């Protein structure tokens, strides 16, 4: 049986898509941290507080996870 994830809203999905694009483009560079993620999202037009809140929600819902200081995106099924 599949383990369904908690649904996310359109704003959270947009943030997740932005972060996936960042990781894909920077796979060989520095790891993605919260600070890097917020900075990147603000460059994409997301407000700083909103970016931080959306990252937190994605972490709580299992769409992101942290290992030390690094944010990781588990594979989607």
Image (tube, rainbow, N blue to C red):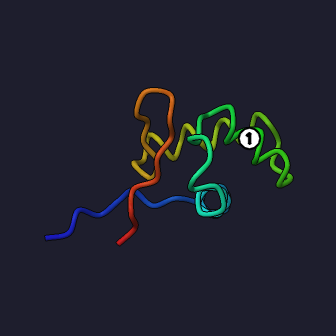
Please state if 13 lies on the left or on the right of 4 as rendered: right
- As drawn, which residue projects farthest toward the top? 68
Please state if 20 lies on the left or on the right of 36 as rendered: left
Can you say which quadrant of the picture contains the C terminus? bottom left
| Image position, residue 71 (x, y; %) | 51, 40
Q: Which residue is rendered at x = 66% and y = 62% of the image?
A: 25
| Image position, residue 27 (x, y; %) | 57, 56
Please state if 46 lies on the left or on the right of 38 as rendered: right
Q: Which residue is rendered at x = 45% and y = 61% of the image?
A: 7
Q: Quadrant of residue 14?
A: bottom right
Q: Which residue is rendered at x = 82% and y = 55% of the image?
A: 44
User: Does residue 60 sit above or below 15 in this rendering?
Assistant: above
Q: What is the crowding at mark 1: few (fewer than 14 residues within 10 Å), some, or many (at least 20)?
A: some
All told, the count of numbered labels is 1
Please state if 43 lies on the left or on the right of 24 as rendered: right
Can you say which quadrant of the picture contains the N terminus? bottom left
Which residue was labeled with disc 1? 50
Q: Which residue is rendered at x = 29% and y = 64% of the image?
A: 4
């Amino acid at each position: 049986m599949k383990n369904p994830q908690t649904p996310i809203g359109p704003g959270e999905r947009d943030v997740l898509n932005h972060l996936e694009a960042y990781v894909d483009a920077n796979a060989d560079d520095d790891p993605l941290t919260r600070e890097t993620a917020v900075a990147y999202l603000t460059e994409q037009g997301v407000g700083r507080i909103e970016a931080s809140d959306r990252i937190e929600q994605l972490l709580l819902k299992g769409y992101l996870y942290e290992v030390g200081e690094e944010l990781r995106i588990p594979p989607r099924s």
